[in-house]
Amino acid sequence: MSFRVKSRSPFEQFSPLATLGRNDKLRMKKIFFILFLVISPLFLISEAHAAASLSLSPTSQSVARDQTFNVNLTLNTGGASTTGCDVILTFNPQILKVESVSFGANPLFSTTNRQTIDNTNGKLTLNSDVVSAAFAYSGTGTLATITFKGLATGSSAVSFNCTGGTDNHADTNVWDTQSQDIVNCSANIGGTYTITSGATEPAATPTPDSDSDQAEATPTPPPPAAGNISLTVSSFIFGIFFFLSGILLRLVFLRT
């Protein structure tokens, strides 16, 4: 009786796995399966951290009654590509009045930039978007410059109406290329502005953009927490993966 010996491929002959028994191979499969279950959710977590935020600059200022002052509205996309945003700001209409809004000569979103000023109820609504994802915006820049006027002495907060995760235009939203709202409401920074009866206190007031190519006022940068964390998380994930892979390979070679 003759027996046929199954030939091995060059990979099987020189692979460390060729020396493992059936139970060892099953154990290795279980380990790799566990690694897959542990690492996969981490990629989802890294995507979830790509959150956008909005901020006002300056965050506080004192001006005399009947005087105007400018506030920059800054968008930080958190590293994500965005196709538009809705911004709803509220203020005390007895203290402040919105005189005008400028999106600048080169707006962040080139297709649509609308404004709805409601000085009766103290509400400013801004809507900006692009026609397609090919024109998406990513980074940190001035979305608009708002000109306020002081009506009466006192202080008024200017706050973002933001609940986060909504799929409508009823509050503040920042849309990514998948039409998902990625704004982090807790990272938004509003402002408080004081109207006095006397002379205006010296303060650096942002200058709104004009049709000429003039330098744009530098806004106050948002806090580090509002930045792009996804790159750091991704690096951490890959570090864990390669570290565990190295341990597994060492175990395999030690058994050969």
Image: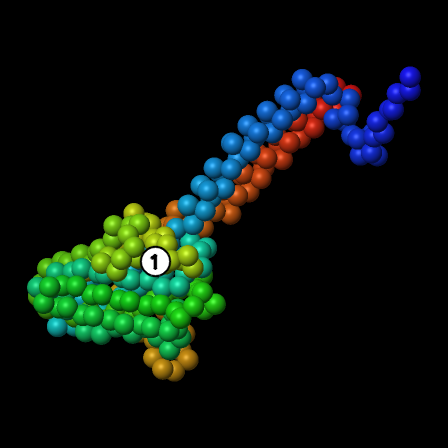
Instruction: Give the colour scheme of this rendering.
Output: rainbow
Horizontal and vertical percent position of residue 129: 35, 68
Q: Is residue 37 above or below residue 189?
A: above
Q: Residue at x 20, y 70 (%)?
A: 116
Q: Quadrant of the N terminus?
A: top right
Q: Residue at x 53, y 35 (%)?
A: 39
Give coordinates of residue 23: x percent, y percent.
67, 17
Total count of labels: 1
In x, y percent, where is residue 196? 12, 64
Residue 2 position, x and y percent, is 91, 20
At a point 51% along the width and 47% down the height, the residue shown is 231
Q: Is residue 17 above or below residue 215?
A: above
Quadrant in which the C terminus is drawn: top right
Q: Name the residue rendered at 29%, 55% in the picture.
A: 167
Q: Is residue 205 left or right of residue 141?
A: left
Question: In the picture, residue 9 is in which quadrant?
Answer: top right
Residue farthest to the right?
Answer: 1
Closest to the observer, 193 or 251: 251
**Res 217 seen here:** yes
Visible residue check, residue 207? no
Estimate how packed mark 1 is, as few (under 14), some (14 to 19) or many (20 or more) residues with alpha carbons within 10 Å.
Answer: many
Quarter of image, res 208: bottom left
Seen as rendered, the residue at the extreme bottom is 212
- Looking at the image, residue 113 sits to the left or right of residue 125; the answer is right
Find residue 96 and report its image quarter.
bottom left
Between 2 and 113, the residue placed more toward the observer is: 2
Picture layout, residue 256 above or below residue 209? above
Read off the residue under disc 1. 174
**232 vs 71, nearest the viewer:** 232
Mark 1 secondary-structure assignment: strand
**Residue type pointed to by label 1:** Val
